[in-house]
């Protein structure tokens, strides 16, 4: 049986790398049938032919060397993500459990590890809406897609000393690094440059490092400079990286503008939902992320709005590496109501009071999940904006959460309510517009963001299997599609810049199941738009923002 190729060899956590890394992907058993991890059972690449039930029991036998078992190091067991609730057993010993299907988690298994081991993961997934679920449904249709179950990211082991570096956080302001190292005792920082290096030893966990004497470059979409940094203790050593970049909102000629390194930038982006025909919730191998990023950059886009889904860390690393900005959505939980959340707002009823005094378990879980997302993604310079709520789905106390999350991470901007139902506090006036083109204006003292638009369908024979097609307007060929896209940018986006429009997110990067409004087909084999014209639109946007 074929292994999972790149997912086996790719280091799953690029910002905190060690030499010790044992991958547990590949062949497992799931409810007695063979499955290829890290692909979920719904994915073709999983090669799973059993029934997908609400309970999935995964089993894996693996061996460790005598040296690894006998040394005094700890052994950590890492899971990238498991949907939705799981219990972990090693050699019949209960290790722990985890709730929520989008974030990584770790267990120290040192007391239970042997030379020959049997790992059992019991997963419960009823698609419980009290947990974050995004666009998953058991009845795929329209903008709702096939659910994911079980293990869908890399499983791996790591050997660490007794006192090890648990995490680091880095942010930058004018060549000053704010560094936080979660470790007990003294540690050394080494930052190599081309012809020099910075070295210093610290005892406190939170330090500031002044790099103003070094000839360094700021990170940008055109020149995404990344610098390596090494943290060492007597027993442990990790490799990480950082970038020098600042995202701010500044007033320029009486309008609020998004600025990258204090220069106004137009956020020219696409909606990226992260679905793939072979791997379902992940590409067949990590290069699928790289290709998506490079394909969008080749068309002139500089932003991906990662829509209601958290990706494996390697996706964000590639965005850091190639200079692709990311608007990261939080993952919704709670019920969705078509009339309240979509139909009425589309008809113009766009206000809803979301303030409540007593939050319930579902809402507490959402807050905690968002806080974990911010902590897990803190180190990625590509992430510039967090979307807290999308179109009112599960929305509550958005003003309060805006300030709570700002306190946790003030290096990012926050779109409190994308589309509609914004209250008072947000960095953006965020608009969704699909069925008409009009010039956008704002009298409010905040940035205007067209956070969803377009969504025009162009079917490509041989590259879809949908019976019912979903999208926002039909184009029969490339010429008709480009005519619709040009009209959108000429009538709405370009003239909106002088009125304060700071960004536009086109729907979407690729087709997904029944939704055929992608720039690329679902298999990524056909680009539906005219590449030369798309580059021209991007150039016009860039020139227009420079003239403000």
Image (spheres, rainbow, N blue to C red):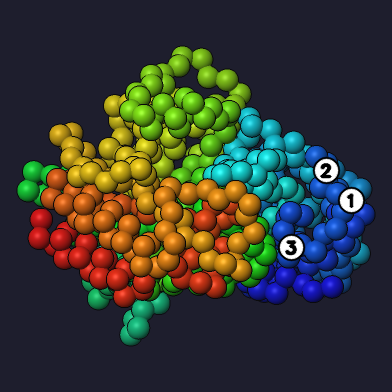
The location of residue 224, given as percent across then percent down, is 35, 71
Question: What is the C-alpha distance between the residues marked 1 and 3?
Answer: 17 Å
**Image quarter in which the N terminus is found:** bottom right
Identify the residue at image location x=32%, y=40%: 431
Q: Earlier in the sequence, mark 2 or mark 3?
A: 3
SS class of the residue under badge 1? loop
Q: Which of marks 1 and 2 is nearer the N terminus?
A: 1
SS class of the residue under badge 2? loop
The location of residue 485, given as percent across then percent down, is 32, 59
Residue labelled with disc 2: 53
Q: Is residue 204 visible?
A: no
Residue sitting nearer the eye, 291 or 437: 437
Q: Is residue 75 visible?
A: yes
**Image quarter in which the C terminus is found:** bottom left
Identify the residue at image location x=53%, y=66%: 460
Residue labelled with disc 1: 31
Residue labelled with disc 3: 44
Q: Which of marks 1 and 3 is nearer the N terminus?
A: 1
Identify the residue at image location x=43%, y=48%: 472
């Amino acid at each position: 049986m074929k292994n999972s190729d790149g997912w086996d060899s790719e280091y799953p956590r690029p910002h905190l790398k060690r030499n010790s890394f044992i991958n547990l992907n590949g062949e497992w058993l799931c409810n007695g049938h063979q499955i290829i991890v890290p692909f979920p059972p719904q994915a073709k690449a999983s090669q799973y032919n059993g029934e997908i039930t609400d309970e999935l029991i995964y089993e894996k036998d693996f061996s460790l060397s005598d040296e690894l078992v006998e040394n005094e190091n700890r052994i950590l067991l890492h899971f990238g993500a498991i949907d939705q609730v799981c219990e972990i057993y090693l050699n019949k010993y209960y290790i722990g459990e985890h709730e929520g299907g989008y974030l990584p988690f770790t267990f120290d298994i040192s007391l239970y590890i042997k030379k020959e081991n049997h790992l059992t993961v019991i997963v419960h997934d009823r698609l419980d809406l009290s947990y974050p679920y995004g666009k998953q449904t058991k009845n795929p249709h329209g903008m709702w897609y096939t659910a994911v179950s079980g293990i869908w990211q890399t499983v791996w082991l790591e050997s660490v000393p007794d006192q090890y570096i648990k995490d680091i956080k880095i942010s930058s302001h004018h060549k000053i690094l704010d560094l936080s190292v979660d470790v007990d005792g003294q540690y050394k920082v080494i930052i190599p440059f081309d012809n020099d290096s910075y070295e210093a030893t610290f005892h406190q966990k939170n330090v500031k490092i002044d790099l103003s004497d070094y000839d360094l470059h700021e990170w940008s979409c055109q020149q995404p400079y990344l610098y390596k940094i090494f943290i060492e203790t007597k027993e442990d050593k990790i490799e990480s990286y950082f970038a020098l970049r600042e995202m701010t909102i500044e007033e320029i000629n009486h309008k609020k503008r998004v600025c990258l390194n204090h220069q106004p930038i137009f956020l020219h982006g696409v909606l990226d939902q992260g679905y793939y025909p072979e791997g379902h919730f992940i590409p067949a191998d990590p290069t699928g992320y790289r290709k998506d990023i490079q394909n969008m950059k080749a068309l002139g886009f500089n932003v991906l709005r990662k829509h209601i889904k958290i990706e494996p860390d390697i996706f964000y690393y590639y965005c850091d590496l190639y200079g692709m900005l990311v608007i990261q959505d939080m993952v919704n939980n709670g019920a969705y109501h078509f009339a309240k959340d979509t139909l009425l707002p589309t008809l113009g009823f766009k206000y809803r009071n979301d303030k409540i005094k007593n939050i319930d378990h579902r809402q507490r879980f959402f807050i905690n999940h968002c806080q974990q997302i911010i902590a897990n993604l803190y180190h990625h310079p590509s992430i510039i904006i967090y979307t807290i709520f999308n179109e009112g789905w599960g929305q509550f106390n958005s003003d309060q959460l805006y300030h709570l999350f700002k306190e946790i991470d003030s290096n990012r901007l926050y779109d409190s309510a994308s589309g509609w139902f914004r209250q008072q506090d947000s960095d953006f006036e965020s608009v969704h517009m699909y069925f008409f083109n009009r010039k956008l204006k704002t009298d409010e003292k905040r940035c205007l963001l067209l956070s969803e638009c377009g969504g025009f369908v162009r079917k490509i024979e041989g590259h879809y299997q949908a019976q019912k097609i979903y999208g926002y307007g039909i184009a029969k060929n490339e010429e008709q599609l480009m005519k619709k896209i040009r009209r959108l940018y000429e009538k709405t986006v370009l003239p909106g810049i002088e009125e304060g429009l700071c960004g536009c997110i086109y729907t979407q990067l690729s087709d997904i199941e029944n939704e055929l409004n992608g720039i690329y087909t679902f298999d990524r084999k056909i680009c539906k738009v005219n590449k030369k014209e798309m580059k021209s639109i991007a150039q016009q946007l860039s020139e227009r923002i420079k003239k403000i």
